[in-house]
Image (cartoon, rainbow, N blue to C red):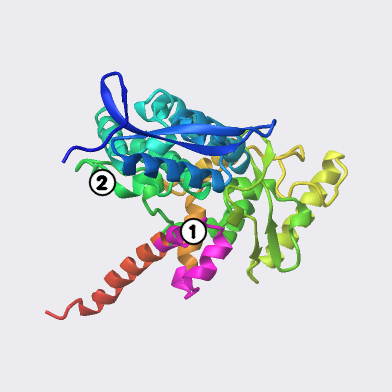
């Protein structure tokens, strides 16, 4: 049975219905036409549109493209909520792989999983797997925002089959769990205090360098800011990064001794000391640039045959908590991970080592 239609456009038959979608500034009704392959199809489009209006969306919300909405979200929502380094990384993903894609030209209300399936298949041909992962992260954040704002009902990315990684994929440093072994930890214990501090607190490099004496209380370290590559002070990486970290008993006297040394350095340099000064300062009593701290670590690591980056100290702190029975939820809060899933990776690595240690009791059995 042929579908009933009531209008023809460019030799194609449609069913057209008209609905009032609002009132203009002069009190006149705003009318809009909806077209479908059948009466039911046209009515569904009308109802979907009117429901969008009821949710507070703009009258022309269904016309906005992914690219247009992405740009607004990126500048007005994303930029104020992330660090400059993260913003620049996301900006690169947008400009190189999203901005001029077919996805960007589509209306936000027309998005379907198949469109992303096709897009990711093309990306897999042109870019590395890790690059695809990064692009997917920023697109997923955007689409989750669209769902939250009710531009779309469901994030279409969640319904696709993401391309499998190649067999020869070399995982990035961020995917691997790298920590210090027992001998390396012993070397750190007898090194610069800033390295000991990093190992015993789990703070990120920028968080350590942004600390002032005001941020240190008798039993806690209050993390509220971070120091960037060029010395700029910004808010921490995530909301969970703003936290209070308990000071271990063994670390408390070392911090007090360090503060005395800092006061003596200021006096020697003729620089007035105040509690707003940086806890870890340079030779001229200013902030320490992250790259300079990396150089100090590289020098120490080279002398002690440690081929691991500074951030390994933070990872080692996490595993130390696990080894000493701290529950995973508490550890996640102390460390400031954005989700408990990140902490789980470290705990899983420790548990794997414990399995090998446990099975060693069978050594010599046969």
Q: Nearer the viewer, residue 167 or 152?
A: 152
Q: Position of residue 330 (x, y in %)?
A: 54, 70
Residue found at x 59% / y 40%:
77
Which residue is the extreme one toward the top? 10
Left or right: residue 154 versus residue 263 is: left
What SS does tag 2 mark? loop
* Residue 334 in view, yes or no: yes
- Is residue 302 visible from the viewing direction of this image? no
Q: Is residue 10 left or right of residue 177?
A: left
Asked whether 99 or 7 is in front, the reply is 7
Q: Residues within 10 Å of mark 1 (few under 14, many from 20)?
A: few
Mark 2 crowdedness (10 Å alpha carbons): few <14, some 14-19, many ≥20: few
* Highlighted magenta segment, given as a residue range: 322-344
> Residue 154: image x %, image y %?
40, 49
Answer with mark 2 or mark 1, whichever residue precedes in sequence. 2
- Name the residue that disc number 1 marks: 339
Which residue position is annotated with label 2? 161
Which of the labelled discs sits on residue 114, or is there none?
Answer: none
Compare residues 268 and 176 and report the one nearer the observer: 176
Q: Secondary structure at mark 1?
A: loop
Residue positioned most to the left: 366
Residue occupying image coordinates x 86% and y 45%: 267
Where does the N terminus fall, quadrant-wise? Answer: top left
Q: Which quadrant of the structure image shows residue 244?
A: bottom right
What residue is at 47 percent from the left and 48 percent from the top? 147
């Amino acid at each position: 049975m042929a579908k009933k239609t009531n209008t023809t456009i460019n030799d194609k038959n449609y069913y057209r219905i008209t609905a009032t979608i609002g009132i203009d500034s002069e009190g006149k009704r705003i009318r809009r036409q909806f077209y479908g392959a059948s009466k039911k199809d046209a009515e569904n489009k009308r109802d979907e549109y009117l429901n969008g209006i009821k949710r507070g969306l703009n009258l022309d919300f269904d016309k906005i493209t992914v690219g247009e909405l992405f740009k607004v979200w990126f500048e007005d929502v994303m930029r104020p909520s992330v660090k400059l380094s993260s913003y620049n990384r996301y900006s690169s993903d947008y400009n190189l792989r999203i901005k001029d894609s077919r996805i960007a030209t589509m209306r936000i209300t027309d998005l379907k999983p198949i469109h992303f399936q096709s897009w990711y298949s093309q990306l897999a041909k042109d870019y590395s797997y890790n690059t695809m992962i990064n692009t997917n992260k920023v697109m997923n954040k955007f689409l989750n925002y669209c769902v939250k704002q009710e531009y779309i009902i469901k994030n279409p990315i969640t319904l696709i089959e993401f391309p499998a990684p190649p067999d020869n994929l070399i995982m990035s440093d961020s995917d691997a769990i790298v920590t210090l072994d027992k001998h390396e930890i012993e070397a750190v214990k007898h090194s610069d205090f800033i390295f000991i501090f990093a190992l015993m607190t789990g703070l990120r490099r920028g968080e350590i360098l942004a600390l002032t004496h005001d941020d240190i209380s008798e039993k806690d370290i209050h993390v509220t800011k971070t120091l960037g590559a060029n010395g700029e002070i910004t808010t921490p990486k995530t909301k969970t990064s703003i936290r209070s970290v308990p000071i271990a008993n063994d670390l408390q006297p070392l911090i007090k001794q360090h503060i005395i040394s800092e006061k003596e350095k200021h006096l020697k340099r003729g620089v007035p000391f105040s509690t707003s000064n940086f806890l870890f300062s340079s030779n001229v009593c200013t902030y320490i640039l992250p790259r300079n701290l990396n150089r100090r670590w590289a020098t120490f690591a080279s002398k002690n045959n440690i081929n691991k980056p500074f951030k390994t100290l933070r990872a080692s702190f996490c595993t130390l908590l696990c080894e000493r029975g701290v529950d995973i939820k508490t550890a996640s809060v102390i460390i400031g991970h954005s989700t408990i899933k990140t902490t789980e990776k470290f705990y899983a690595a420790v548990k794997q080592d414990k399995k090998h240690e446990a099975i060693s009791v069978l050594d010599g059995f046969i």
